[in-house]
Image (tube, helix red, strand yellow):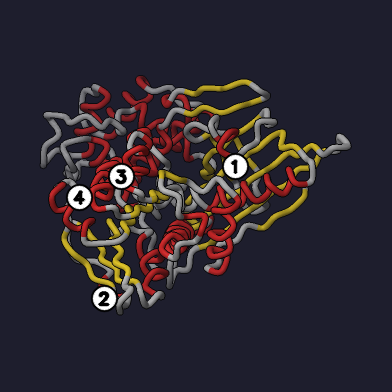
Amino acid sequence: MADTVKILVLGDGMVAPPCVEYLSRNPKNEITVGIRSGKGLAAQYPRTKSIALDVSNSADLEAQVAAHNLVISLIPYAHHADVIKAAIKSKANVVTTSYVSPAMRALEDEVKKAGIVVLNEVGVDPGVDHLYAIKTIDEVHAKGGKIKEFYSYCGGLPAPECANNPLGFKFSWSPKGAILSQRNSASFLKDGKQVDIPSTELMSTAKPYHVMDGYSFVAYPNRDSVPFRDFYGIPEADTVVRGSLRYKGNPEFVQALAGLGWVTPEKKEWLKEGITWGEIQQKLIGASGPDKKTLVNRIKEVYKFPSEEEADRIISGMDEFGLFSDTPATIKDSNIFDTLCYQLAQLLNFKPGERDLVMLQHKFVVEWRDGKKDTLTSTLELLGDPNGFSAMALSVGATCGVATQLLLDGHPAFTKPGIHAPYTREMCDPIREGVAKEGVVLVEKVL
């Protein structure tokens, strides 16, 4: 076909399949999935092949990017700047589902000079959240109203019936990414003032948050919400909070793991094959022995639990995860955190027949011209299909696929060179309409 479009997808993780499936529907698209192992999604979808590609090898990365019209980067965000640099050289467009990082923003002038589009934040959070925030904000402004308060919370979780473990969590995306997201510092606006929370205290700010009946969520702020007053065009808002949802009991568990040394990324000389889980915990807290009783007594000395009941719940959970056992640990990258993530990924994966849940809700407190106030909500309750795509994969992958196809089709909102995220109605509306056809729809209500 003369006008074939060559697409390079970097990474074949949990969210890649719906993206590749969506793009493979267009007969013009030829898709190459680049992953370390070289074995991937090729057999499942038409005009799709897999190749072995290590993105840390810049010569290989540049050669592959140069052979394609567009690159979708679904690898960890730390690599995006390198992908964009390669794309600048060969004038290929780029799509990511990640927030725009300072390292990416620093390349904006070169991106514009190369005449390419780098489209970001087209996943679920960030992504689908923007599509409906911008929609409601524009509609309120058009009617002369003001957004006085804006709250947005999202969680990628197991469905309630599958949240049957001490962490109340299973991994529908990278275990490391999921836990690290609970170790960020956070900033938000509350009643006109900026509130800053250090990463060490984030989990202790989690509070019960009602989204809809049938769920027992807690919520905490996520990253920096402050710029979203400008991004979303709501200078009138006194309160702007974007955050995450977890099930009750999860933040305290993550806080305890961190407090007991399990979330340490530094390499440890003593962390070698053959060491047992009990011996690791012994080293981390300076216990006199690796047996469970000694470890538990020492844990209660060194870590301040919210209550005796919580201490018992969390310690028994750690025991269930094998963290006091005399079983040798599988060491990953010579550091505790990667070793723990590997263990949790083995224990907390979705079993056949289990479903995940993506829950996303915006809450807008609106003041109308006559002084009347309303609270509007937009809510996504998306459950995964045990025989198909997970909710996380569909909401991230389909959004990325839809946005990519709009860019490839030359839709007017996606042609201006630069580094972009969907913060305008012109960009958001077509993505939202496309994603709705894939089954990702928020229900809008006036409370």
Of the residues shown, which amino acid type is indicated by label 2?
A: Ala
Q: Which residue is mark 1?
A: 152
From the top left corner, tell me how far across and down residue 418 is, in percent: 41, 44
- Assign a secondary structure to mark 1: strand
Give me the C-alpha separation between circle 4 and circle 1.
Answer: 34 Å
Question: Could you tell me if the residues under marks 1 and 2 are in contact, i.e. CB atoms within 8 Å?
Answer: no
**257 or 150, nearer to the observer:** 150
Residue that mark 2 sits on:
43
- Distance between mark 2 and mark 4 Cα atoms: 22 Å
When the figure is inspected, residue 277 is found, relative to residue 390, above or below; the finding is above
Residue at x-position 42% and y-position 26%: 199
Mark 3 vs 1, N-terminal side: 3
Residue 41 left/right relative to 241 = left
Reading the image, the residue beneath label 3 is 80
Q: In whole angstroms, how far apart are the C-alphas of marks 3 and 2?
A: 27 Å
| C-alpha gap between disc 1 and disc 2 | 39 Å
The structure residue drawn at horizontal position 30% and vertical position 28%, both measured from the top left corner, is 261
Q: Nearer the viewer, residue 345 or 302?
A: 345
Mark 2 residue crowding within 10 angstroms, few (<14) / some (14–19) / many (20+): few
Which of the two discs, 3 and 2, sits closer to the camera? 3
